[in-house]
């Protein structure tokens, strides 16, 4: 029988967005708790970690320092690092799967990890709105997690995503940003109400909107944005008698005085601003701009761009609270509109 090596328990996943030193520490922590690595066991040297895991010496050292901070590991000069604690409570281990990296997702992640604290292990993956990669990641990394936190947005495909997600125990599942039809009851969620949010946000902007006659929603073709945004936009325009249009390609769209553009995607926002400048229209006077999702720069571009945004800090706090309290809830986040000079 093949003798097991300590590297059967310690590994680093190149597909994961979790920092490698955290992955290293999480593996050792899990192996200690499960009894695969015992108290007083001498761990591999930094050189051995570098060779076997293909990580830098600084990464290996940082992982060991992180474990020392948790009180799991100590070191003796000239001898090496060894395990000093083995009777700690089993830590939560979270599988976090989101659609893409962005400023707002970073806000969520930073708040989420800070609220959970150092004793919660997180394996973090990004699937770039690709259902095929989403399916692969979820199918191949399924064991040993106390919770699965999933943000389901797909550019295309995804019609069977609910079937895949239904294989996860519902007392371990938390969905972010949007619910999916067909998910069996009992899971947690921290979501936006896209239809209601855009309607209510535009209502709060009714006074500055009233100097325009047409509102155009820039909704990229084959995007991951929920159709409910378009539905709420249409209802608002009908209720308050605005001419309306859903635009798939902003680079080809007519821009004229009296129009307001709502940009969901920041690339479309940049294209729109460049085109407005070329035809010498005044933003906030001749044409209006509303952008989805607050970022620090939008406070300053064009003396301030009006934004509609979900509170991603609250998303992080509420999600962490469900995990720490082991209590699944259905939470709907508030949406805000920040009125600025672009309107």
Image (cartoon, rainbow, N blue to C red):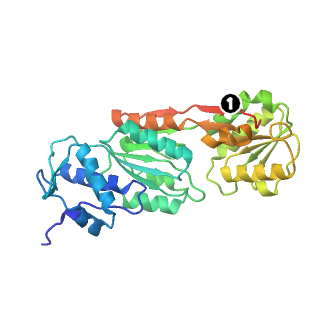
Please tell me whether residue 158 is drawn above or below residue 186 in the rendered image: below
Whether 24 is drawn above or below 50: the answer is above
Which residue in the structure is indicated by mark 1? 200
Location of residue 37 in the rendering, given as x and y in whole percent from the top left corner: 16, 55
Camera-side residue of 42 and 197: 42
Q: Which residue lies furthest to the front in this view?
A: 77
| Residue shown at the point (46%, 44%) measured from the top left | 109
Give percent across and percent down for residue 205: 74, 30
Q: Which of 168 and 285 is in front in this view?
A: 285
Camera sees residue 15: yes
The percent coordinates of residue 229 (x first, y second) are 67, 42
In the figure, is residue 29 to the left or right of 14? left
Quadrant of the drawing holding the N terminus: bottom left
Residue at x-position 82% and y-position 49%: 277
Q: In the image, 59: left or right of 280?
A: left
x and y, in percent, of residue 234 in the image: 75, 40
The answer to whether 219 is drawn above or below residue 327 in the figure is below
Q: Is residue 247 visible?
A: no
Residue at 23% over, 66% down: 48
Residue 77 lies left or right of residue 52; in this view the side is left
Where residue 196 sits, quadrant-wise, is top right
């Amino acid at each position: 029988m093949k003798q097991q090596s300590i590297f059967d328990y310690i590994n680093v996943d190149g597909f994961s967005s979790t920092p490698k030193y955290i992955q290293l520490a999480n593996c050792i922590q899990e192996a200690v708790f499960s009894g695969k690595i015992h108290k007083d066991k001498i761990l591999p040297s930094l050189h051995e970690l570098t060779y076997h895991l293909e990580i830098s010496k600084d990464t290996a050292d940082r992982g060991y320092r992180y474990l020392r901070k948790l009180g799991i590991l100590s070191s003796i000069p000239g001898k090496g690092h060894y395990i000093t604690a083995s009777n700690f409570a089993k830590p939560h281990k979270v599988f976090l799967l989101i659609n893409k990296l962005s400023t707002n997702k970073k806000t969520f992640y930073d708040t989420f990890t800070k609220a959970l604290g150092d004793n919660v292990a997180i394996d973090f993956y990004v699937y770039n709105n690709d259902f095929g990669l989403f399916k692969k990641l979820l199918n191949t990394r399924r064991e040993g997690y106390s919770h699965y936190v999933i943000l389901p947005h797909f550019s295309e495909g995804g019609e069977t995503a609910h079937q895949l997600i239904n294989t996860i125990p519902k007392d371990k599942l938390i969905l972010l940003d949007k619910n999916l039809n067909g998910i069996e009851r009992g899971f947690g969620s921290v979501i936006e109400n896209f239809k209601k949010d855009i309607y209510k946000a535009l209502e709060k902007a009714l006074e500055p909107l009233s100097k325009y006659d047409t509102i155009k929603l820039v909704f990229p073709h084959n995007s991951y944005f929920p159709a409910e945004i378009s539905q709420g936009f249409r209802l608002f325009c009908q209720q308050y008698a605005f001419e309306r249009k859903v635009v798939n390609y902003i680079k080809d769209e007519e821009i004229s005085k009296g129009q307001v553009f709502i940009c969901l995607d920041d690339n479309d926002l940049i294209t729109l601003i460049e085109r407005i400048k070329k035809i010498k229209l005044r933003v906030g006077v001749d044409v209006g701009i509303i952008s989805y999702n607050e970022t620090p720069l939008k406070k300053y571009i064009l003396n301030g761009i009006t934004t509609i945004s979900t509170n991603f800090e609250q998303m992080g706090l509420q999600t962490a609270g469900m995990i720490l309290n082991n209590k699944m809830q259905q939470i709907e986040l508030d949406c805000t509109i920040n009125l600025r000079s672009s309107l």
